[in-house]
Image (cartoon, helix red, strand yellow):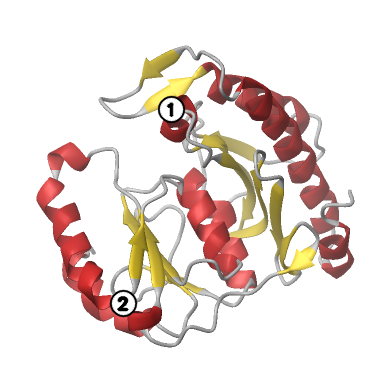
């Protein structure tokens, strides 16, 4: 486990290292599948008008599940493609998985996608990995064990003014039902920051925030598998996550503002009028 051994050294909680090793094995296996299928013809199905699933999503998910089912930890499994298990209890232990975050990018051979896996228990992510197979970048974090990229410690940026900030956002799959709201948020933010990017994979946006390549990220309509691993990365890297009012964030809340912390209150002032809470 050369990709995570320095993070493993910092894992003090019982069993956390083993959980992180399991997540890493699963993410690497899924990433290998995605890399092998990238650039080839795909079988594309529509879950919604702009919400896609490919054979790669399903193959990567199956590879992850095969590894997790061998894991001795008693946890539910929540994945994007299989959905919410029966009698799901978010207060219990659960693996939260996106086998291919950025499916639309993948389907169009746009090289911005990855695998996201989190171990979530007692209302918090305790271990999280995000793997970008084409870039060979492996992000990982453990509760109180720091955030890491390819075995190097990472932290959020030190940008202290929104005017100097590079921020990212995403568009929800139901954008056709509320385009005015999404465009209004973009219009409100655009003149107040240095730049905005919309790459199309929330987990990777959060990983890039954690390592200082972005200074903030916001989006609505997110699902737990989009944010559970990224939340831990950002927190362990020194960042802050909330809803648009500044209240604590949970992956089960579909409204997220994440930042390096220094510009968080400035961004809340811009976004709070768009909050649904």
| Vertical side of 118 occupied by 156: above or below | below
Give the numbered dot on residue 191: none
Q: Tell me: 28 left or right of 276.
A: right
Instruction: Residue 237: give x, y in percent of width and height.
Output: 63, 72
At x 82% / y 55%, what residue is drawn? 4
Give the numbered dot on residue 108: 1
| Vertical side of 163 occupied by 219: above or below | above
Q: Tell me: 53 left or right of 244.
A: right
At x 50% / y 14%, what residue is drawn? 42
Does residue 276 appear in this view? Answer: no
Q: Secondary structure at mark 2?
A: helix
In terms of sequence position, does the residue under pointer 2 or pointer 1 come before the other?
Answer: 1
Task: Depth check: give the residue in front, 174 or 246.
Answer: 174
Instruction: Residue 250: give x, y in percent of width and height.
Output: 45, 60
Give the numbered dot on residue 267: 2
Task: Depth check: give the residue in front, 27 or 225.
Answer: 27
């Amino acid at each position: 486990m050369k990709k995570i051994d320095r993070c493993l050294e910092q894992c003090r909680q019982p069993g956390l290292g083993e959980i992180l090793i399991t997540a890493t094995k699963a993410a690497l296996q899924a990433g290998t599948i995605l890399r092998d299928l990238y650039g080839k013809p795909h079988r594309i199905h529509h879950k919604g008008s702009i919400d896609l699933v490919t054979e790669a999503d399903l193959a990567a998910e199956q590879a992850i599940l095969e590894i997790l089912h061998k894991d001795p930890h008693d946890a539910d499994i929540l994945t994007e493609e299989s959905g919410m298990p029966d009698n799901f209890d978010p207060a219990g232990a659960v693996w939260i998985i996106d086998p291919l975050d950025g499916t639309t990018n993948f389907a169009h051979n746009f090289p911005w996608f990855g695998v996201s896996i989190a171990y979530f228990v007692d209302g918090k992510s305790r271990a999280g990995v995000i793997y970008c197979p084409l870039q060979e970048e492996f992000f990982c974090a453990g509760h109180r064990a720091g955030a890491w990229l390819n075995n190097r410690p990472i932290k959020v940026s030190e940008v202290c003014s929104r005017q100097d900030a590079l921020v990212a956002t995403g568009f929800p799959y139901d954008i056709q039902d509320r385009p005015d709201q999404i465009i209004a948020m973009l219009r409100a933010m655009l003149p107040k920051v240095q730049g905005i990017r919309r790459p199309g994979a929330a987990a990777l946006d959060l990983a890039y925030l954690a390592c200082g390549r972005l200074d903030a990220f916001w989006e609505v309509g997110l699902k737990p598998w989009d944010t559970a691993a990224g939340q831990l990365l950002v927190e362990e890297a020194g960042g802050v996550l909330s809803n648009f009012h500044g209240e604590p964030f949970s992956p089960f809340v579909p409204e997220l503002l994440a930042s390096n912390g220094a510009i968080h209150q400035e961004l809340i002032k811009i976004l709070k009028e768009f909050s649904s809470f």
